């Protein structure tokens, strides 16, 4: 006996998520990617051509990559096939390629959309090459990761990379307006809460619509949420930041550039973003130590001490108290005079060492612990600098086959100005005393 009463009213199927119901029907409706989908956008021009080349869509989640791929598929006569690299193995790929070859033999093309294409390993990525070369498939791959790092060079050479941008606040606001029009009711948010909602979405169109749905579900009749209440109701969405991938490297790079550019305010902003995203504070502290050596050096020798002290302070205090010590170090190194003279000198010294092999130092500056070594001239005529006038003998320390080189050139900033004076003084004495 059936447990379903066929005569009774059937339940309405659950409504699709708001993001699905608001999917654009044409490229012109895609929000926030006008540089690609506008009248003169790259994609608009490409899709207007008789044939379509393979493409890689690179951009953050919720920027419209899947939507655009589907719209392109719907606009062409090719068979559109969509797969996800997360759920697709070698056997399924082989079936897709075989079917595409069969269609090609019959005069039909295949447009293959691969979501999360960076999830395929190198061998799997290489398997696309033959069917791309013989025209069996036109590939559209979507990735949130930098293709330069995650995709094979051979695959990238056969596809054009199109960059999808995070949605600007204006584009996210336009999505909210469309959602309100579809729902036939306004979002129960005051102006500040509405701004906070778009900020929480972090450039992700899907996220802003999901958050809007949560607001409609949570708000009581007649209630208008302010920003504080909004955070309590929907919780705070974590920033889009993968500590193992691009977000990690982009933000630490931005922090480093701000320090090098002597902008402590911008440096603090990126530092706060990294802390907020859950970055390991000790990783940041280690990078600040590196900045102190690479970009400040001896222009302010105290910078390295401050950076190391901040690392030790965080190690001692932990989060969140120790984060202030790292912030203090970031401000110090950003405000310090800059010099990469030691950094450049060390690089030049490494290159010189590799170029000349392993010539012996002058025997005069080598110890002679045995009689044989003394007979061979080790340590002969060595001049003890503390016995010389000005504690400076001016003798030559370079191997004869290498000769003297000027590697370290102090800048005229900070403490290195004083070091430059010392080096010029010693150079003058060395010349006077015949040391070369």
Image (spheres, rainbow, N blue to C red):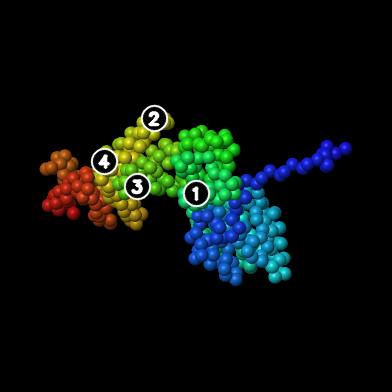
Q: Quadrant of the C terminus?
A: bottom left
- The picture quadrant where one finds residue 255 is top left
Instruction: Residue under label 2, please give it.
Output: 321
Instruction: Residue under label 1, please give it.
Output: 173
Q: Nearer the viewer, mark 3 or mark 4?
A: 3
Label whose residue precedes the other's in the sequence (3 or 4) = 3
Question: Mark 1: which secondary structure?
Answer: helix
Q: Is residue 17 visible?
A: yes
As measured in the structure, the alpha-carbon distance from the residue carrying label 1 to the one carrying label 3 is 30 Å
Residue 189, percent across and down? Answer: 50, 40
Question: Mark 3: which secondary structure?
Answer: helix
Residue 87, percent across and down? Answer: 65, 49
Asked whether, in this view, residue 118 is left or right of residue 294, the answer is right
Label whose residue precedes the other's in the sequence (4 or 2) = 4
Residue 36's place in the image compared with 430, above or below, is below
Q: Are marks 2 and 1 in contact (CB under 8 Å)?
A: no
Question: Callout 3 environment at 10 Å: few (<14), some (14 to 19), or many (20+)?
Answer: many
Residue at 33 percent across and 36 percent down: it is 328
Question: Mark 2: which secondary structure?
Answer: loop
Asked whether, in this view, residue 42 is left or right of residue 373, the answer is right
Picture disc at residue 258: 3
Picture disc at residue 301: 4
As measured in the structure, the alpha-carbon distance from the residue carrying label 4 to the one carrying label 2 is 26 Å
Q: Quadrant of the N terminus?
A: top right
Asked whether 13 or 63 is in front, the reply is 13
């Amino acid at each position: 006996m059936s447990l379903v009463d066929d005569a009774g009213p059937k339940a309405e199927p659950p409504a699709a998520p708001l993001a699905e119901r608001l999917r654009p029907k044409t490229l012109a409706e895609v929000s926030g990617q006008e540089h690609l989908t506008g009248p003169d956008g790259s994609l608009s021009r490409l899709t207007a051509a008789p044939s379509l080349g393979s493409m890689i869509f690179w951009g953050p989640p919720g920027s419209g990559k899947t939507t655009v791929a589907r719209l392109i598929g719907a606009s062409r006569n090719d068979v559109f096939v969509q797969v996800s690299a997360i759920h697709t193995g070698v056997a399924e790929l082989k079936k897709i390629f075989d079917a595409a070859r069969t269609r090609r033999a019959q005069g039909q093309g295949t447009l293959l959309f691969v979501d999360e294409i960076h999830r395929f390993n190198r061998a799997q990525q290489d398997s696309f090459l033959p069917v791309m070369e013989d025209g069996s498939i036109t590939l559209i791959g979507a990735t949130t990761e930098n293709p330069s790092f995650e995709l094979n060079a051979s695959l990238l050479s056969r596809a054009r990379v199109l960059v999808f941008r995070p949605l600007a606040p204006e584009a996210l606001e336009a999505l909210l307006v469309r959602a309100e029009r579809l729902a036939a009711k306004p979002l129960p948010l005051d102006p500040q809460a509405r701004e906070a909602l778009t900020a929480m979405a972090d450039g992700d169109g899907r996220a802003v619509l999901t958050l809007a749905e949560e607001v409609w579900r949570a708000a009581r009749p007649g209630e208008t949420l302010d920003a504080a209440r909004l955070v309590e109701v929907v919780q705070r969405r974590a920033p889009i930041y993968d500590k193992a991938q691009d977000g990690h490297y982009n933000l630490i790079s931005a922090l480093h550039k701000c320090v090098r550019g002597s902008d402590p305010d911008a440096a603090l902003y990126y530092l706060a973003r990294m802390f907020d995203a859950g970055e390991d504070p000790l990783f940041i502290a280690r990078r600040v130590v590196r900045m102190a050596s690479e970009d400040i050096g001896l222009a302010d020798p105290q910078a390295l001490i401050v950076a190391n002290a901040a690392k030790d302070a965080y190690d001692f205090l932990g989060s969140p108290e120790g984060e202030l010590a790292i912030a203090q170090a970031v401000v110090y190194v950003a405000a310090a005079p800059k010099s990469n003279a030691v950094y450049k000198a060390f690089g030049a010294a490494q290159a010189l060492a590799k170029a000349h092999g392993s010539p012996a130092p002058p025997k005069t500056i080598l110890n002679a612990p045995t009689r044989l070594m003394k007979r061979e001239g080790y340590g002969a005529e060595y001049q003890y600098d503390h016995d010389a006038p000005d504690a400076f003998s001016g003798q030559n320390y370079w191997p004869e086959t290498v000769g003297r080189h000027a590697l370290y050139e102090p800048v005229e900033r900070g403490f290195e100005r004083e070091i430059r004076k010392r080096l010029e003084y010693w150079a003058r004495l060395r010349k006077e005393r015949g040391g070369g």
